[in-house]
């Protein structure tokens, strides 16, 4: 049974404003680690805050388990303090006037847990997160990473059914972030809580989530496993938002460049039924260069280009190709054997082509043609 | 696996989720709005402030247009009828010069003179303090602000103690006793009022202009110099244009303060019939000319509103300039060279004139029987603790007089309760403004609590008198009670209190409270264990600042207080009126001490520079 259901959820901050969240339907399963991913202003934090009850709906309904916690039509609103959730804020929002211990046991005291039990629970949570030495300190005396752990401990102490995390790692430095990611994953395994995690960092979403929901401009774009999102982006937005360096997009319809012409010709010759295709996307790592031994693979899409830049990124390289004015980026893990100024032939296997229709949605016809095995 | 997207599935489900009707939306929003006491508190506060702030002002303005009791015959209309009589009387009649135009000219000329003088003195001091290597800059930076912490008419009393001549009775002034009779123009009226107001308000210039100078990036100067501009060109083309908003703002503020200033012109203007708008208003109220008083109060209010509007504009402009302050901003000090000692001497002299001399004069005057006679037998502590003095009234030293203790107790009680109330109300207003889902309520509260800022204290007091002098509905006549003083003071202090509260609540942000909410804390619990404990500091400032300005405040009390509800300020003024010079000066010293040490205490408690807060 799905744990959290959002139905037709809409949020509008003013009569004339665009919808911050529009017509959102989302199911979050029990024990799932769900990432809401999207650029800033896409409505992901608003969605999280609506689940928590900190933001009110303009339309729609939210259920947790069998209980309706929020419904405009039914006139139901369960306040945040009665939803039994945990929320870790981006700014941590620790209470500056309370010690770490008092911050952590705040929820337990509210629940009138007996002293001995409460202390045991606080000890356990603090140990799990490695903050037991800071008990008597105040939040301002801790570093960012330590504060983040306290913010987590505070919410985990009450053992909530649902844990909501609003970009909790964005204020940490890179090394600490990696460590905290591993920790979050461990906590998820250990506590088996349902987690909803908001981030704009695709890497974070990919590494942590069991399911990712990609949002843009208040609209849900795609829900799926991290692999789904990367391998089968539902539309151009998802394809372009996920992946670094970003996917190469070649316009078909009105693209005037040489690559566009080639792509049109390629699809037209082999797959006439894809006549409505609007663009194709090529992931940088799917691009190959033809060399003396291995030419262009059978049935591949290919073309001529000039190498206009080689950017080493430590262990891998980004190669900038220019084909009659249009730029394509490819990545390779082998030291490139070409130099800037070389004329090269690039190619892509058909199953690595992402074909989008004129509206930018993934062409299911193309998937049937290119990846017949994967469709159930 | 639903690999591609949920979009198509969502389309199907959407049919089931019908859009809510208007009634449903309204019911849902109402449920949320009323779930927490925030909105209810907001509505109650809005009603309270409407009654304490808006209603008195409207009542007073309507007095200006209605026939007042006792004027029926003269106007030949019934009490309460609409009339232009008072407006005509104030602006276009035989007495309008004495009532309005004369005082207006006096007010304007005093204000302009005070502004010019304080710009000159304060501007120079600001520059010396913030951009030069003058000696003792840190000490002077605090010392030169002190005049603003003392009540303005402290200086007026010191002035009369020194310069009083035979135009008025009572003890002669020091100069007179020494055989030199000061002319009237030096002893009373425009000249001393202008000088005293200039000294009292030059701390404004030092603070506002000094801050702007400190923020000014020396690299801006350097860039111009490198491009070939002379020192003078740099001053004219770069520094002055950038400093203009802060200078203008200081000027406008001083003007607004001069407009409502009552004590100084009352003490120094009365003997030569030098009236300003505030004293003219006071005299009309004192002689029960309610209608004329209302017109005058309305005029003062209007001028005040215009000035503050101009100031708000200028502040916006100033903020536009602030953004140019770059990261590598430099504040280089100009070496004064040979001028270093004269410059320091100038600052010291200004301190002496604006703090040392007045306080010293007042102090000495309270321990001398005959003014300016510096022989040992002339000194006495009788005026402080003596008994069986040979006077008509007040036969004991001031400290033994029950009237003083009564007034002191009134001051502490009235001002204390009012400050505490307004501080708490301010925090509450801040909370509602920051939290209520009903936005218009927040806007209304913010604006209504700011309103008294536009109204000079004396006009506000007149408004209170107009509303509460007679019983209205269930509310009995409050004139002569301490309650009316408290209410007026609370309303008068709300702009500062609510501004402090809003700033504190906005700065705190929603999140600490939301975190508590998520953890399961209800509204009351969040207030007592999260919001108020975190805002302790802000609350202290929000109580202490109004307390200090209330202790030394005069214009509000002078209209509303009666002898039985005397506070320290009105008591000292009464003593002035009865020519108990020593006693009056002693009371003023007590007030000055309370205000100064209160400010120091506040600075210690909140670890902030209160002097800056006092300026606004």
Image (cartoon, grey):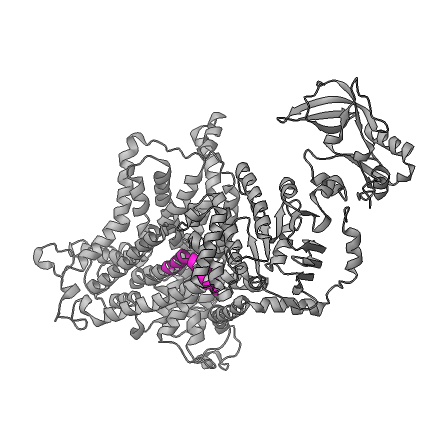
Would residue A30 be found to the left or right of residue A154 on screen?
Answer: right
Residue ID at (80%, 21%): A294
**Magenta extent:** B525-545
Where is residue A112? Give x, y as percent. Answer: 47, 65
Residue at point 31% right, 46% down?
A: B142
- Given residues B347 and B594, the one toward you in this image is B594
Name the foreground residue: B533 vs B301: B533
Residue B339 drawn at (x, y percent): 29, 33
Q: Estimate the x, y position of residue B376 in percent, counting from the top left.
A: 8, 56
Could you tell me how many numbered marks the image carries?
0
For the question of whether residue B191 can be seen, the reply is: no
Q: Main secondary structure of the magenta part?
A: helix
Q: Answer with left or right where residue A61 lies relative to residue B298.
A: right
Quarter where residue B425 is shown: bottom left
Q: Is residue B10 above or below residue B524?
A: above
Q: Determine whether, in the image, residue B431 is placed left or right of residue B147.
A: right
Residue A271 sits above or below residue A224 on the image: above
């Amino acid at each position: 049974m799905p744990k959290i259901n959002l139905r037709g959820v809409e949020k509008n901050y003013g009569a004339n404003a665009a919808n911050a969240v529009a017509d959102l339907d989302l199911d979050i399963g029990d024990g799932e680690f769900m990432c809401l991913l999207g650029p800033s202003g896409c409505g992901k934090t608003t969605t999280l805050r609506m689940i928590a009850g900190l933001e009110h709906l303009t339309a729609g309904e939210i259920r947790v388990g069998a209980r309706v916690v929020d419904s405009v039509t039914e006139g139901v609103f369960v306040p945040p303090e009665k939803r039994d959730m945990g929320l870790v804020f981006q700014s941590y929002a620790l209470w500056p006037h309370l010690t770490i211990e008092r911050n952590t046991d705040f929820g337990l005291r509210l629940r009138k847990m007996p002293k001995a039990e409460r202390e045991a629970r606080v000890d356990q949570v603090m140990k799990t997160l490695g903050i037991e030495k800071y008990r008597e300190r105040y939040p301002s005396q801790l570093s960012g990473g330590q504060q983040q752990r306290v913010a987590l401990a505070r919410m985990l102490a009450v053992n909530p059914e649902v844990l909501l995390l609003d970009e909790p790692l964005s204020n940490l430095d890179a090394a600490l972030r990696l460590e905290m990611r591993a920790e979050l994953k461990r906590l998820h395994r250990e506590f088996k809580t349902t987690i909803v995690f908001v981030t704009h960092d695709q890497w974070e979403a990919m590494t942590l989530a069991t399911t990712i929901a990609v949002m843009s401009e208040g609209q849900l774009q795609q829900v799926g496993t991290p692999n789904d999102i990367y391998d089968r982006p539902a539309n151009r937005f998802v394809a372009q938002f996920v992946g670094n360096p970003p996917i190469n997009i070649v316009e078909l319809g009105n693209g005037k460049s040489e690559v566009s012409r080639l792509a049109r010709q390629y699809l037209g010759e082999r797959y006439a039924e894809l006549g409505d295709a609007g663009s194709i996307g090529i992931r940088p790592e799917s691009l190959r260069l033809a060399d003396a031994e291995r030419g262009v693979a059978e049935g591949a899409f290919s073309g001529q280009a000039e190498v206009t830049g080689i950017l080493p990124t430590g262990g891998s390289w980004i190669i900038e190709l220019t084909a009659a004015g249009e730029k394509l980026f490819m990545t390779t893990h082998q030291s490139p054997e070409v130099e800037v100024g070389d004329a090269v032939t690039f190619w892509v296997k058909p199953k690595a082509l992402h074909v989008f229709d004129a509206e930018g949605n993934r062409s299911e016809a193309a998937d049937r043609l290119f990846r017949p095995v994967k469709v159930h | 696996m639903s690999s591609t997207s949920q979009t198509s599935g969502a389309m199907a489900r959407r049919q089931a989720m019908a859009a809510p009707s208007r009634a449903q939306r309204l019911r849902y929003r109402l449920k949320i709005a009323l779930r927490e006491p925030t909105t209810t508190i907001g509505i109650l506060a809005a009603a309270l402030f409407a009654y304490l702030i808006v209603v008195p002002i409207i009542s007073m303005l309507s007095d200006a247009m209605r026939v007042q009791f006792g004027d029926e015959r003269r106007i030949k209309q019934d009490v309460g009828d609409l009339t232009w009589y008072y407006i005509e009387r104030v602006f276009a009649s035989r007495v309008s010069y004495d009532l309005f135009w004369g005082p207006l000219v006096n007010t304007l000329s005093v204000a302009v003179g005070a502004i010019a003088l304080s710009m000159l003195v304060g501007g120079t001091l600001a520059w010396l303090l913030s951009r030069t290597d003058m000696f003792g800059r840190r000490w002077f930076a605090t010392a030169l602000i002190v005049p603003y912490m003392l009540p303005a008419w402290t200086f007026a009393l010191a002035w009369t103690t020194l310069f009083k001549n035979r135009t008025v009775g009572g003890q002669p002034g020091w100069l007179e006793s020494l055989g030199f009779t000061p002319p009237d123009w030096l002893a009373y009226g425009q000249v001393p009022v202008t000088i005293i107001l200039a000294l009292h308000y030059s701390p404004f210039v030092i603070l506002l202009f000094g801050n702007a100078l400190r923020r000014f990036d020396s690299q801006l100067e350097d860039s111009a110099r490198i491009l070939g501009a002379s020192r003078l060109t740099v001053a004219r083309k770069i520094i002055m244009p950038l400093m203009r908003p802060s200078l203008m703002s200081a000027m406008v503020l001083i003007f607004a303060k001069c407009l409502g200033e009552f004590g100084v012109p009352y003490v120094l203007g009365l003997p030569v019939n030098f009236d300003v708008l505030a004293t003219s208003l006071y005299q009309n109220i004192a002689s029960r000319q309610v209608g004329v008083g209302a017109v005058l109060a309305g005029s003062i209010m209007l001028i005040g509103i215009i000035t503050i509007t101009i100031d708000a504009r200028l502040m916006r402009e100033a903020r536009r300039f602030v953004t140019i302050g770059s990261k590598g901003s430099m504040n280089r000090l100009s070496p004064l060279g040979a001028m270093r000692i004269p410059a320091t001497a100038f600052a010291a002299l200004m301190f002496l004139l604006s703090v040392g001399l007045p306080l010293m004069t007042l102090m000495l005057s309270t321990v001398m029987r005959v003014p300016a006679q510096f022989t040992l037998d002339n000194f006495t502590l009788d005026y402080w603790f003596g008994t069986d003095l040979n006077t008509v009234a007040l036969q004991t030293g001031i400290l033994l007089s029950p009237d003083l203790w009564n007034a002191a107790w009134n001051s502490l009680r009235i001002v204390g309760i009012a400050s505490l109330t307004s501080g708490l109300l301010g925090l509450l207003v801040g909370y509602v403004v920051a939290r209520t889902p009903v936005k218009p309520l927040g806007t209304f509260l913010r604006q209504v609590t700011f309103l008294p800022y536009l109204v000079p204290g004396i006009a506000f007091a007149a408004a209170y008198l107009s509303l509460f002098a007679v019983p209205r509905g269930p509310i009995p006549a409050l004139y002569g009670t301490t309650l009316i003083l408290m209410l007026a003071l609370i309303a008068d202090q709300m702009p500062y209190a609510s501004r402090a509260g809003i700033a504190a609540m906005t700065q705190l942000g929603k999140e600490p409270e939301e975190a508590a909410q998520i953890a399961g804390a209800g509204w009351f619990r969040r207030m007592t264990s999260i919001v108020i404990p975190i805002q302790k500091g802000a609350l202290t400032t929000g109580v202490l600042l109004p307390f200090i300005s209330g202790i030394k405040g005069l214009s509000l009390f002078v209209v509303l207080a009666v002898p039985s509800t005397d506070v320290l300020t009105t008591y000292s003024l009464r003593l002035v009126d009865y020519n108990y010079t020593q006693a009056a000066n002693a009371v003023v010293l007590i007030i000055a001490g309370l205000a100064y040490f209160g400010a120091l205490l506040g600075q210690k408690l909140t670890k902030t520079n209160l002097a800056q807060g006092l300026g606004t």
